[in-house]
Image (spheres, rainbow, N blue to C red):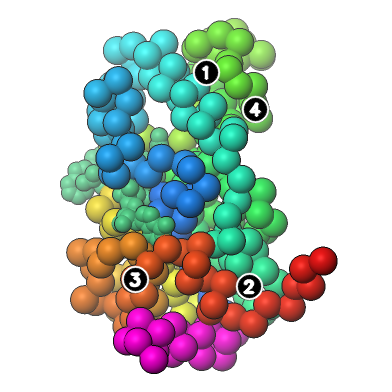
Amino acid sequence: MSENEEKIFEAKEIIESCASLTVLTGAGISAESGVPTFRGKDGLWRNFRSEQLATPDAFWDNPKLVWEWYDWRRSAIKEARPNPGHFALAELEGQKRNMTLITQNIDGLHQMAGSKKILEIHGNIWQVRCTKCGDIKQNHRVPLEETPPRCELCGEIGRPNVVWFGEIIPMEVIDRSLKAIEECDVMLIIGTSGVVEPAASLGLVAKQTGKKVIEINLESTTNSPLFDLTLLGRSGEILPLLYTSHKVYS
Ligand code: BV8
Ligand code: ZN
């Protein structure tokens, strides 16, 4: 048995024997669904780095440009479907007394795979929030009829209902994420480079509160040495191996 296979076997034992599981996902879990990751080679658009466009300043400098970028990402995500990694987490949720899925992804693929208890800490690309009255509307139109889209209530311009760099994550969402880490026995961290704060510190909070932390990633990350186990590979291939599926595939 290879070292990685031994680790997968050990991880399966830990995950199957735990009652309460908290999961943190990043762009890596959606990579096999064809959604561009943030930092990888496909994190570029018209030679803009994601961090340059995902800021309030970039938006107010040129709302049309930033909306064209989100319209482009929406058209890419619209074609995407959940992969075996997303489905494995949805099934695992059904097997656990308590499981919370904290995601940095704004693509909505976890919901599409059937996951229920989800905390979208960076928001959702299919929601438009009014910059004046704050009204939030689901909007799945691709391409958008107009960029920027306007608020149906007050006519002011809308913005993507996401958390931009330099913006704080709503306290209620942070509180519920920390509560989920406090309550869990095991934390699973999947497909995140661990660069963006405060999400990158959630795994450290779990370690500092004595939880077992298992990481799944294509490559080791800055925090890997701090975690109990790091399984290297594609999450869509590894996650289905970490529990016993009761699904009957017709
Ligand atoms: C805040 C929504 C308070 C928008 C996103 C200096 C030091 C420390 C922190 C800061 C600093 N300066 C500024 C900050 C704060 C900043 C930050 O962390 N910056 C970083 C870049 C240094 N954070 C913030 O601004 C946050 N707010 O801190 O408020 C404050 C306020 C003012 C000033 C200071 C502080 C808000 C952050 C939220 C930003 N919004 N998204 C949108 O999407 O348009 S972040 C966005 O990027 C994603 O949501 C995600 O969080 C992040 C991308 O990271 P990952 O998901 O990890 O993806 P990445 O591509 O990096 O990695 C993918 C990994 O998967 C790789 O390791 C790869 O190997 C692996 N992989 C690939 N394929 C697979 C795979 N793994 C498994 N299977 C595969 N198949
Ligand atoms: Zn409005």
Residue at x 47% of width, y 29% of height: 73
Instruction: Inspect this view and state whether residue 87 appears.
Output: yes
Which of discs 4 and 1 lies nearer the camera? The answer is 4
Q: Is residue 122 depicted above or below 7 in this figure?
A: above
Is 127 on the left-hand or right-hand side of 27?
Answer: right
Q: Which sits earlier in the primary sequence, circle 3 or circle 1? A: 1
Q: Nearer the viewer, residue 64 or 204?
A: 64
- In this rendering, which labeled residue sits more in front, label 3 or label 4? 3
SS of the residue under disc 2: helix
Position of residue 38 measured from the top left corner of the image (x, y, whole percent): 34, 42
In which image quadrant can residue 211 be found?
bottom left
Q: Nearer the viewer, residue 163 or 8?
A: 8
Q: Which mark is residue 140?
A: 4
Mark 4 or 1 closer to N-term? 4
| x then y, percent, for residue 246 | 74, 78
Magenta highlight range: 1-19
Q: Kindly identify the residue that appears in the image at 49 percent across and 12 percent down.
A: 148
Disc 2 to disc 3: CB gap under 8 Å? no
| Residue 230 picture location, percent across and down | 33, 76
Query: Disc 1 vs disc 2: Cβ atoms closer than 8 Å?
Result: no
Amino acid type for the residue under numbered disc 1: Gly
User: Which numbered dot is residue 92?
Assistant: 2
Question: Which residue is at 47% across, 41% downward?
Answer: 35
> What is the C-alpha distance between the residues marked 4 and 1?
14 Å
Q: Earlier in the sequence, mark 4 or mark 2?
A: 2
Cα distance in 3D space between marks 3 and 4: 35 Å
Q: CA distance from mark 1 to mark 2?
A: 36 Å
Q: Which residue is mark 3?
A: 232
Dot 3 amino acid type: Leu
